[in-house]
Image (tube, rainbow, N blue to C red):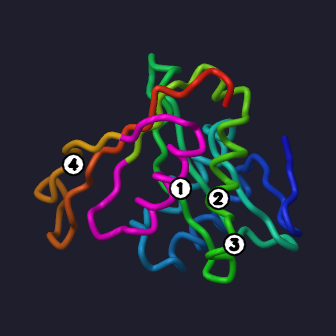
Amino acid sequence: MTTTQSKLVYRKPTAEDGGKVWQLVKDTQVLDLNSAYSYIMFCDYFADTCVVAESDGAIVGFVSAFCPPGNAETLFVWQVAVDSSQRGKGVATELLRVLMQREACRQVNMVELTISPSNQASRALFMRMARELNTDMNVRSGYAAALFPGGGHEDEELYQIGPIPSAK
């Protein structure tokens, strides 16, 4: 499904989008930058649970997510990236709305993600998502900072949004 909101096109990514997504994430300067290969792979193998926002051929938004193996009822949102030119315009919210409308998310009744304590923007985004879905958001311990090599990484708290009513 492709949707358009104020000149932006929201669509499934392709492998060819992977390099542009990598650059978008790099340019945010706040998200963990993974290898270009990982973004190419996500855009290819997980296209049904990822969304890009495109403006005049440029990728200006991206959400990557997947259903863990053997658990089609849970959607794990890995990263949400929005170009600085598009922040504050509801792009991240629309990326998530488009994703939740996908056939691949039809069985999803729980959304999970991790957020570091200092990331207030992500916390606000997902609190809004829980409100829009008319459900609860719970927080518990996720990945401890000690798990991340090199030091300097915050703890990642695990957020769970759900149960999600069947009419998303």
Residue marked by disc 1 = 37
In the image, which residues are magenta?
114-137
Look at the picture and state if 59 lies above or below 51.
below
Q: Nearer the viewer, mark 3 or mark 2?
A: 3
Q: Quadrant of the N terminus?
A: top right
Element under label 2?
helix
Give the CA separation, mark 4 to mark 3. Answer: 30 Å
Q: Nearer the viewer, mark 2 or mark 1?
A: 2
In the depicted view, which residue is nearer to us: 86 or 104?
A: 86
Residue positioned 53% across, 53% down in the render: 128
Residue positioned 61% across, 53% down in the render: 40
Q: Earlier in the sequence, mark 4 or mark 3?
A: 3
Residue marked by disc 2 = 18
Residue marked by disc 3 = 89
Q: Quadrant of the C terminus?
A: top right
Disc number for residue 119: none
Q: Is residue 166 left or right of residue 136?
A: right
Q: Is residue 127 magenta?
A: yes
The three-letter code of the residue at mark 2 reads: Gly
State the image coordinates of residue 90 (x, y, percent, origin top left). 67, 65
Q: Nearer the viewer, mark 4 or mark 2?
A: 4
State the image coordinates of residue 72 (x, y, percent, origin top left). 52, 20
Element under label 1?
helix
